[in-house]
Amino acid sequence: MPSHEIAVPNLADPKTYADHDMTEIWRRLRAEDPVHRHPESEYGPGFWVVTRYQDVSQVLRDDKSFTSERGNVLATMLQGGDTGAGRMLAVTDGPRHTELRRLLLQAFAPRALAGVTLRVRQSVRRLLTEAVERGECDFAQDIASVIPLETICDLLAVPVADRQEVLKLTKSALASDYESPGADMDRMARGEILLYFSDLLKERRKRPGTDPISLMANAEVQGERLSEEDIILNCYSLIMGGDETSRLSMIGAVRALVENPAQWLALKNGDVTVESAGEEVLRWTTPTMHFGRTATADVKVGERVIAAGDLVTLWFTAANRDEAAFPDPDRFDLARSPNKHLSLGYGRHFCLGAYLGRVEINAMLDGLRTFAGDIELTGPGRRIYSNFLSGMSSLPIALKADPAGPSRRPE
Ligand code: HEM
Protein backbone atom coordinates (compact mmCIF):
# COMPACT_ATOMS: atom_id res chain seq x y z
CA MET A 1 0.00 0.00 0.00
CA PRO A 2 1.37 3.46 -0.80
CA SER A 3 2.77 5.40 2.10
CA HIS A 4 0.26 8.25 2.09
CA GLU A 5 -2.45 5.86 3.19
CA ILE A 6 -0.72 5.19 6.51
CA ALA A 7 -1.56 8.01 8.88
CA VAL A 8 1.89 8.72 10.27
CA PRO A 9 1.84 11.46 12.92
CA ASN A 10 4.61 14.08 12.96
CA LEU A 11 7.61 12.12 14.23
CA ALA A 12 9.53 15.30 15.05
CA ASP A 13 6.89 16.37 17.56
CA PRO A 14 7.57 15.03 21.09
CA LYS A 15 3.84 15.10 21.73
CA THR A 16 3.34 12.35 19.13
CA TYR A 17 4.84 9.76 21.45
CA ALA A 18 2.70 10.83 24.39
CA ASP A 19 -0.52 10.81 22.36
CA HIS A 20 -0.15 7.66 20.24
CA ASP A 21 0.48 4.02 20.84
CA MET A 22 3.24 3.77 18.25
CA THR A 23 3.41 -0.05 18.11
CA GLU A 24 0.76 -0.35 15.41
CA ILE A 25 2.16 2.57 13.39
CA TRP A 26 5.64 1.02 13.38
CA ARG A 27 4.19 -2.37 12.45
CA ARG A 28 2.37 -0.92 9.46
CA LEU A 29 5.38 1.08 8.34
CA ARG A 30 7.61 -2.01 8.52
CA ALA A 31 5.08 -4.01 6.54
CA GLU A 32 3.85 -1.47 3.99
CA ASP A 33 6.28 1.41 3.70
CA PRO A 34 9.55 0.42 5.37
CA VAL A 35 11.53 3.36 3.97
CA HIS A 36 8.98 6.10 4.44
CA ARG A 37 9.28 9.72 3.31
CA HIS A 38 8.29 12.03 6.16
CA PRO A 39 7.11 15.41 4.88
CA GLU A 40 8.61 18.72 5.96
CA SER A 41 6.84 20.40 8.87
CA GLU A 42 7.19 23.34 11.23
CA TYR A 43 10.08 21.38 12.79
CA GLY A 44 12.17 21.39 9.63
CA PRO A 45 12.73 19.67 6.29
CA GLY A 46 11.50 16.22 5.27
CA PHE A 47 13.43 13.09 6.17
CA TRP A 48 13.43 9.33 5.61
CA VAL A 49 12.01 6.99 8.23
CA VAL A 50 13.63 3.54 8.18
CA THR A 51 11.88 0.88 10.30
CA ARG A 52 12.98 -2.61 9.22
CA TYR A 53 15.78 -4.32 11.13
CA GLN A 54 17.66 -5.21 7.96
CA ASP A 55 17.50 -1.71 6.50
CA VAL A 56 18.45 0.01 9.77
CA SER A 57 21.46 -2.33 10.04
CA GLN A 58 22.45 -1.59 6.43
CA VAL A 59 22.59 2.15 7.06
CA LEU A 60 24.45 1.78 10.38
CA ARG A 61 27.02 -0.47 8.71
CA ASP A 62 27.57 1.77 5.69
CA ASP A 63 29.54 4.66 7.12
CA LYS A 64 30.82 5.54 3.66
CA SER A 65 27.40 6.47 2.26
CA PHE A 66 26.05 7.86 5.54
CA THR A 67 27.66 10.38 7.87
CA SER A 68 27.01 11.34 11.49
CA GLU A 69 28.83 14.65 11.06
CA ARG A 70 25.65 16.54 10.20
CA GLY A 71 24.00 15.42 13.42
CA ASN A 72 22.89 12.01 14.62
CA VAL A 73 19.51 12.82 16.20
CA LEU A 74 16.44 14.31 14.59
CA ALA A 75 16.55 17.55 16.60
CA THR A 76 20.04 18.57 15.44
CA MET A 77 19.63 17.19 11.92
CA LEU A 78 16.48 19.25 11.39
CA GLN A 79 18.29 22.35 12.66
CA GLY A 80 20.95 21.84 10.00
CA GLY A 81 23.75 20.24 12.03
CA ASP A 82 25.44 19.60 15.35
CA THR A 83 27.81 22.17 16.86
CA GLY A 84 29.97 19.31 18.14
CA ALA A 85 30.47 17.88 14.64
CA GLY A 86 34.00 16.65 14.00
CA ARG A 87 34.84 17.10 17.69
CA MET A 88 32.38 15.07 19.76
CA LEU A 89 32.87 11.34 19.25
CA ALA A 90 29.28 10.47 18.30
CA VAL A 91 29.18 13.14 15.56
CA THR A 92 32.67 12.60 14.20
CA ASP A 93 33.56 10.22 11.37
CA GLY A 94 36.60 8.85 9.57
CA PRO A 95 40.14 8.60 10.96
CA ARG A 96 39.52 11.24 13.65
CA HIS A 97 36.63 9.17 15.02
CA THR A 98 38.74 6.00 14.94
CA GLU A 99 41.59 7.62 16.87
CA LEU A 100 39.43 9.36 19.45
CA ARG A 101 37.40 6.22 20.00
CA ARG A 102 40.52 4.08 20.41
CA LEU A 103 41.77 6.52 23.03
CA LEU A 104 38.52 6.60 25.00
CA LEU A 105 38.04 2.84 24.77
CA GLN A 106 40.99 2.44 27.14
CA ALA A 107 38.79 3.87 29.90
CA PHE A 108 35.76 1.77 28.90
CA ALA A 109 37.37 -1.67 28.75
CA PRO A 110 35.99 -4.17 31.31
CA ARG A 111 39.34 -4.34 33.13
CA ALA A 112 39.56 -0.55 33.44
CA LEU A 113 36.01 -0.51 34.78
CA ALA A 114 36.47 -3.15 37.50
CA GLY A 115 36.32 -0.60 40.33
CA VAL A 116 33.38 1.29 38.81
CA THR A 117 31.52 -2.00 38.32
CA LEU A 118 31.98 -2.99 41.95
CA ARG A 119 30.66 0.36 43.15
CA VAL A 120 27.62 0.15 40.83
CA ARG A 121 26.70 -3.18 42.44
CA GLN A 122 27.19 -1.78 45.93
CA SER A 123 25.06 1.31 45.21
CA VAL A 124 22.27 -0.77 43.69
CA ARG A 125 22.20 -3.05 46.71
CA ARG A 126 22.20 -0.12 49.14
CA LEU A 127 19.39 1.72 47.33
CA LEU A 128 17.26 -1.41 46.95
CA THR A 129 17.71 -2.44 50.58
CA GLU A 130 16.63 1.02 51.71
CA ALA A 131 13.64 0.98 49.35
CA VAL A 132 12.54 -2.45 50.51
CA GLU A 133 12.76 -1.26 54.12
CA ARG A 134 10.56 1.73 53.34
CA GLY A 135 8.17 -0.56 51.43
CA GLU A 136 7.58 1.93 48.63
CA CYS A 137 9.40 4.40 46.44
CA ASP A 138 9.37 6.19 43.14
CA PHE A 139 11.66 3.76 41.37
CA ALA A 140 12.56 6.35 38.72
CA GLN A 141 13.41 9.21 41.06
CA ASP A 142 14.76 7.38 44.11
CA ILE A 143 16.75 4.57 42.52
CA ALA A 144 17.16 4.63 38.74
CA SER A 145 18.07 8.30 38.54
CA VAL A 146 20.86 7.92 41.09
CA ILE A 147 22.90 5.06 39.60
CA PRO A 148 23.88 6.34 36.14
CA LEU A 149 25.01 9.80 37.22
CA GLU A 150 26.92 8.43 40.19
CA THR A 151 28.53 5.94 37.83
CA ILE A 152 29.60 8.58 35.32
CA CYS A 153 31.04 10.74 38.12
CA ASP A 154 32.93 7.67 39.23
CA LEU A 155 34.09 6.96 35.68
CA LEU A 156 35.32 10.53 35.25
CA ALA A 157 36.89 10.37 38.73
CA VAL A 158 34.99 13.45 39.93
CA PRO A 159 36.29 14.04 43.48
CA VAL A 160 33.85 12.80 46.12
CA ALA A 161 33.61 16.26 47.70
CA ASP A 162 32.26 17.75 44.43
CA ARG A 163 29.78 15.03 43.59
CA GLN A 164 26.61 16.41 45.15
CA GLU A 165 27.07 19.68 43.31
CA VAL A 166 27.88 18.01 39.98
CA LEU A 167 24.90 15.68 40.36
CA LYS A 168 22.61 18.61 41.08
CA LEU A 169 23.84 20.54 38.04
CA THR A 170 23.60 17.59 35.67
CA LYS A 171 20.08 16.87 36.84
CA SER A 172 19.02 20.44 36.05
CA ALA A 173 20.83 20.48 32.73
CA LEU A 174 19.34 17.26 31.43
CA ALA A 175 15.66 17.90 31.47
CA SER A 176 13.67 15.96 28.93
CA ASP A 177 11.46 14.84 31.82
CA TYR A 178 9.07 17.71 31.59
CA GLU A 179 6.96 19.27 28.92
CA SER A 180 8.24 22.80 29.45
CA PRO A 181 11.62 22.66 31.13
CA GLY A 182 12.97 25.83 32.73
CA ALA A 183 15.16 26.68 29.79
CA ASP A 184 17.14 29.44 31.50
CA MET A 185 18.00 27.35 34.49
CA ASP A 186 19.06 24.51 32.21
CA ARG A 187 21.39 26.78 30.28
CA MET A 188 22.94 28.09 33.47
CA ALA A 189 23.42 24.60 34.85
CA ARG A 190 24.97 23.52 31.56
CA GLY A 191 27.34 26.49 31.64
CA GLU A 192 28.38 25.65 35.20
CA ILE A 193 29.07 22.03 34.33
CA LEU A 194 31.26 23.11 31.43
CA LEU A 195 33.19 25.46 33.76
CA TYR A 196 33.54 22.70 36.32
CA PHE A 197 34.99 20.31 33.73
CA SER A 198 37.35 23.02 32.56
CA ASP A 199 38.80 23.21 36.10
CA LEU A 200 38.94 19.44 36.39
CA LEU A 201 40.81 19.31 33.09
CA LYS A 202 43.52 21.71 34.33
CA GLU A 203 43.96 19.47 37.34
CA ARG A 204 44.23 16.32 35.19
CA ARG A 205 46.83 17.88 32.93
CA LYS A 206 49.00 18.27 36.04
CA ARG A 207 48.11 15.02 37.76
CA PRO A 208 46.79 12.51 35.19
CA GLY A 209 44.97 9.34 36.14
CA THR A 210 43.43 6.64 33.94
CA ASP A 211 40.00 8.28 33.55
CA PRO A 212 38.72 9.56 30.16
CA ILE A 213 39.50 13.22 31.02
CA SER A 214 43.13 12.40 31.79
CA LEU A 215 43.38 10.30 28.64
CA MET A 216 42.07 13.13 26.48
CA ALA A 217 44.12 15.76 28.32
CA ASN A 218 47.41 14.05 27.67
CA ALA A 219 47.08 12.37 24.28
CA GLU A 220 47.32 13.48 20.68
CA VAL A 221 44.65 12.83 18.07
CA GLN A 222 45.76 13.19 14.45
CA GLY A 223 49.09 14.52 15.65
CA GLU A 224 47.68 17.32 17.80
CA ARG A 225 46.66 17.83 21.39
CA LEU A 226 42.88 17.98 21.83
CA SER A 227 41.65 21.47 22.60
CA GLU A 228 40.07 22.26 25.96
CA GLU A 229 36.76 22.78 24.22
CA ASP A 230 36.90 19.39 22.49
CA ILE A 231 37.66 17.62 25.76
CA ILE A 232 34.88 19.36 27.63
CA LEU A 233 32.42 18.65 24.83
CA ASN A 234 33.30 14.96 25.01
CA CYS A 235 32.95 14.90 28.81
CA TYR A 236 29.55 16.42 28.44
CA SER A 237 28.59 13.89 25.81
CA LEU A 238 29.56 11.04 28.14
CA ILE A 239 27.12 12.39 30.68
CA MET A 240 24.44 12.85 28.05
CA GLY A 241 25.11 9.42 26.54
CA GLY A 242 25.25 7.53 29.77
CA ASP A 243 22.65 9.05 32.04
CA GLU A 244 19.15 8.86 30.66
CA THR A 245 19.70 5.79 28.52
CA SER A 246 20.68 3.49 31.40
CA ARG A 247 18.14 5.14 33.66
CA LEU A 248 15.25 4.60 31.25
CA SER A 249 16.13 0.97 30.64
CA MET A 250 16.19 0.23 34.39
CA ILE A 251 12.83 1.92 34.90
CA GLY A 252 11.38 0.13 31.87
CA ALA A 253 12.71 -3.15 33.25
CA VAL A 254 10.75 -2.80 36.48
CA ARG A 255 7.58 -1.89 34.65
CA ALA A 256 7.93 -4.82 32.26
CA LEU A 257 8.61 -7.24 35.12
CA VAL A 258 5.51 -6.09 36.99
CA GLU A 259 3.41 -6.43 33.84
CA ASN A 260 4.82 -9.89 33.09
CA PRO A 261 4.68 -11.84 36.36
CA ALA A 262 5.81 -15.12 34.78
CA GLN A 263 9.00 -13.43 33.58
CA TRP A 264 9.61 -11.91 37.01
CA LEU A 265 9.26 -15.38 38.50
CA ALA A 266 11.67 -16.82 35.93
CA LEU A 267 14.21 -14.16 36.88
CA LYS A 268 13.73 -14.69 40.61
CA ASN A 269 13.96 -18.47 40.35
CA GLY A 270 17.12 -18.30 38.31
CA ASP A 271 15.45 -19.93 35.27
CA VAL A 272 17.04 -17.21 33.14
CA THR A 273 20.42 -15.60 33.58
CA VAL A 274 20.69 -11.94 34.48
CA GLU A 275 22.71 -11.41 31.27
CA SER A 276 19.99 -12.84 29.04
CA ALA A 277 17.36 -10.83 30.94
CA GLY A 278 19.45 -7.66 30.53
CA GLU A 279 19.55 -8.06 26.73
CA GLU A 280 15.77 -8.47 26.56
CA VAL A 281 15.33 -5.42 28.78
CA LEU A 282 17.48 -3.46 26.32
CA ARG A 283 15.46 -4.68 23.33
CA TRP A 284 12.13 -4.17 25.07
CA THR A 285 12.81 -0.69 26.37
CA THR A 286 14.90 0.66 23.46
CA PRO A 287 15.65 3.90 25.35
CA THR A 288 16.87 5.78 22.27
CA MET A 289 14.00 5.51 19.81
CA HIS A 290 16.07 6.62 16.85
CA PHE A 291 19.45 7.80 15.66
CA GLY A 292 20.09 9.42 12.32
CA ARG A 293 22.54 9.96 9.49
CA THR A 294 22.87 12.12 6.38
CA ALA A 295 23.44 10.40 3.04
CA THR A 296 26.69 11.35 1.31
CA ALA A 297 25.85 9.52 -1.94
CA ASP A 298 22.77 8.21 -3.71
CA VAL A 299 22.07 4.82 -2.18
CA LYS A 300 19.33 2.22 -2.35
CA VAL A 301 17.73 1.19 0.94
CA GLY A 302 14.99 -1.39 0.58
CA GLU A 303 13.05 -0.38 -2.54
CA ARG A 304 13.81 3.33 -2.27
CA VAL A 305 16.68 5.45 -3.51
CA ILE A 306 17.95 7.88 -0.90
CA ALA A 307 19.67 10.88 -2.48
CA ALA A 308 22.97 12.42 -1.38
CA GLY A 309 22.21 15.08 1.23
CA ASP A 310 18.98 13.46 2.45
CA LEU A 311 18.35 13.09 6.17
CA VAL A 312 17.74 9.52 7.29
CA THR A 313 16.28 8.47 10.65
CA LEU A 314 16.71 4.90 11.86
CA TRP A 315 13.98 3.78 14.24
CA PHE A 316 15.52 1.26 16.61
CA THR A 317 12.23 1.11 18.45
CA ALA A 318 10.60 -0.27 15.28
CA ALA A 319 13.53 -2.45 14.17
CA ASN A 320 13.72 -4.11 17.59
CA ARG A 321 10.14 -5.32 17.11
CA ASP A 322 10.66 -6.51 13.53
CA GLU A 323 9.04 -9.92 13.18
CA ALA A 324 11.64 -10.82 10.51
CA ALA A 325 14.42 -10.51 13.10
CA PHE A 326 12.68 -11.51 16.35
CA PRO A 327 10.13 -14.32 16.55
CA ASP A 328 7.06 -13.16 18.49
CA PRO A 329 8.59 -9.68 18.88
CA ASP A 330 5.86 -8.23 21.11
CA ARG A 331 6.52 -10.83 23.78
CA PHE A 332 8.79 -9.83 26.67
CA ASP A 333 10.89 -12.98 26.88
CA LEU A 334 13.90 -12.88 29.18
CA ALA A 335 15.22 -16.12 27.71
CA ARG A 336 15.16 -14.79 24.14
CA SER A 337 18.08 -16.17 22.16
CA PRO A 338 19.52 -15.03 19.84
CA ASN A 339 18.76 -11.43 20.73
CA LYS A 340 20.71 -9.19 18.41
CA HIS A 341 18.80 -6.01 19.26
CA LEU A 342 19.95 -2.61 18.03
CA SER A 343 19.45 -0.72 21.31
CA LEU A 344 23.18 -0.04 21.62
CA GLY A 345 23.58 0.70 17.93
CA TYR A 346 25.73 -1.17 15.44
CA GLY A 347 28.81 -0.53 13.34
CA ARG A 348 31.48 2.10 13.96
CA HIS A 349 29.43 4.19 16.36
CA PHE A 350 28.33 1.20 18.46
CA CYS A 351 27.79 2.48 21.99
CA LEU A 352 31.07 3.25 23.71
CA GLY A 353 29.43 2.72 27.10
CA ALA A 354 27.79 -0.60 26.16
CA TYR A 355 29.68 -2.60 28.76
CA LEU A 356 28.98 -0.01 31.45
CA GLY A 357 25.30 0.29 30.53
CA ARG A 358 24.96 -3.49 30.72
CA VAL A 359 26.73 -3.55 34.09
CA GLU A 360 24.18 -1.06 35.46
CA ILE A 361 21.11 -2.85 34.08
CA ASN A 362 22.33 -6.29 35.13
CA ALA A 363 23.25 -5.07 38.61
CA MET A 364 19.73 -3.71 38.97
CA LEU A 365 18.14 -6.97 37.79
CA ASP A 366 20.35 -8.97 40.12
CA GLY A 367 19.56 -6.63 43.02
CA LEU A 368 15.83 -6.86 42.37
CA ARG A 369 15.73 -10.63 42.21
CA THR A 370 17.82 -10.86 45.36
CA PHE A 371 16.08 -8.31 47.57
CA ALA A 372 12.54 -7.87 46.24
CA GLY A 373 9.86 -10.49 46.79
CA ASP A 374 6.94 -8.72 45.29
CA ILE A 375 6.69 -5.53 43.22
CA GLU A 376 3.50 -3.60 42.50
CA LEU A 377 2.79 -0.37 40.66
CA THR A 378 1.10 2.09 43.00
CA GLY A 379 0.42 4.90 40.53
CA PRO A 380 0.29 5.59 36.81
CA GLY A 381 3.79 7.10 36.62
CA ARG A 382 4.79 9.71 34.07
CA ARG A 383 6.23 9.35 30.57
CA ILE A 384 9.14 11.49 29.48
CA TYR A 385 8.48 14.07 26.81
CA SER A 386 10.84 13.57 23.88
CA ASN A 387 11.07 12.64 20.21
CA PHE A 388 14.36 10.85 20.90
CA LEU A 389 14.15 9.03 24.23
CA SER A 390 11.42 6.73 25.40
CA GLY A 391 10.40 5.70 28.90
CA MET A 392 9.15 6.90 32.27
CA SER A 393 10.41 9.68 34.52
CA SER A 394 8.28 8.58 37.45
CA LEU A 395 7.28 5.05 38.48
CA PRO A 396 5.76 4.73 41.94
CA ILE A 397 6.01 1.17 43.26
CA ALA A 398 5.50 -0.88 46.41
CA LEU A 399 8.33 -3.30 47.13
CA LYS A 400 8.08 -6.24 49.50
CA ALA A 401 11.24 -7.83 50.84
CA ASP A 402 12.26 -11.30 49.81
CA PRO A 403 12.60 -12.98 53.20
CA ALA A 404 15.32 -15.26 51.86
CA GLY A 405 16.98 -12.43 49.93
CA PRO A 406 20.26 -11.29 51.38
CA SER A 407 21.10 -14.66 52.93
CA ARG A 408 20.34 -16.46 49.67
CA ARG A 409 22.92 -14.52 47.71
CA PRO A 410 25.40 -12.92 50.07
CA GLU A 411 27.74 -10.26 48.65
C1 HEM B 1 26.67 5.62 21.24
C2 HEM B 1 22.68 3.72 23.27
C3 HEM B 1 24.90 3.78 27.62
C4 HEM B 1 28.24 6.73 25.73
C5 HEM B 1 25.44 5.01 21.41
C6 HEM B 1 24.58 4.59 20.34
C7 HEM B 1 23.46 4.07 20.92
C8 HEM B 1 23.62 4.15 22.35
C9 HEM B 1 22.24 3.51 20.20
C10 HEM B 1 24.87 4.71 18.83
C11 HEM B 1 24.65 6.12 18.31
C12 HEM B 1 24.79 6.23 16.81
O1 HEM B 1 24.90 5.23 16.10
O2 HEM B 1 24.77 7.37 16.30
C13 HEM B 1 22.95 3.56 24.63
C14 HEM B 1 22.07 2.88 25.57
C15 HEM B 1 22.71 2.87 26.79
C16 HEM B 1 23.97 3.58 26.62
C17 HEM B 1 20.71 2.29 25.24
C18 HEM B 1 22.31 2.30 28.12
C19 HEM B 1 21.44 1.37 28.29
C20 HEM B 1 26.00 4.58 27.49
C21 HEM B 1 26.91 4.92 28.57
C22 HEM B 1 27.84 5.78 28.05
C23 HEM B 1 27.53 5.95 26.63
C24 HEM B 1 26.80 4.40 30.00
C25 HEM B 1 29.02 6.47 28.69
C26 HEM B 1 29.19 6.67 29.95
C27 HEM B 1 28.11 6.65 24.36
C28 HEM B 1 29.02 7.32 23.43
C29 HEM B 1 28.57 6.98 22.13
C30 HEM B 1 27.41 6.13 22.30
C31 HEM B 1 30.20 8.22 23.80
C32 HEM B 1 29.19 7.41 20.80
C33 HEM B 1 30.08 6.29 20.27
C34 HEM B 1 30.69 6.59 18.91
O3 HEM B 1 30.18 7.45 18.20
O4 HEM B 1 31.71 5.95 18.59
N1 HEM B 1 24.85 4.72 22.63
N2 HEM B 1 24.05 3.98 25.31
N3 HEM B 1 26.41 5.20 26.34
N4 HEM B 1 27.17 5.94 23.64
FE1 HEM B 1 25.67 4.87 24.47
Image (cartoon, rainbow, N blue to C red):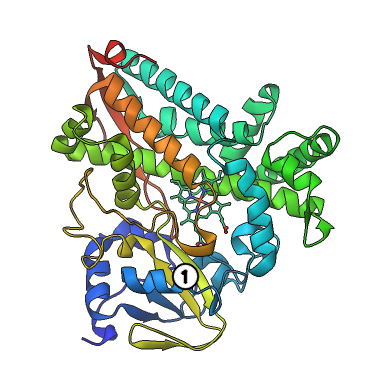
Look at 23% across and 60% down and name the residue there: 326
Q: Residue 394 placed where, x, y %? A: 37, 37
Outermost residue on the left side: it is 262
Residue density around tag 1, few if under 14, some if 14–19, many if 20 or more, within 10 Å: some
Q: Describe residue 207's horizontal placement relative to residue 72 as left or right.
A: right
Asked which quadrant contains residue 359, the reply is: top left
Residue 182 pos. (x, y %): 57, 46
What x and y, as percent, mark residue 64? 56, 77
Q: Residue at x 38, y 60 (%)?
A: 15
Residue identified by numbered label 1: 61
Image quadrant where one finds the C terminus: top left
Residue at the extreme front of the image, as rendered: 111
Give the quarter of the figure containing the N terminus: bottom left
Give whichever of 36, 278 is nearer the camera: 278
Q: Which amino acid, by three-letter code, is at mark 1?
A: Arg
Q: Position of residue 246 (x, y in %)?
A: 45, 42
Q: Is residue 112 left or right of residue 257?
A: right
Is 282 drawn above or below residue 162 in the view shown?
Answer: below
Q: Give the residue at x 21% y 29%.
A: 270
Residue at 63%, 44% (x, y): give it: 106
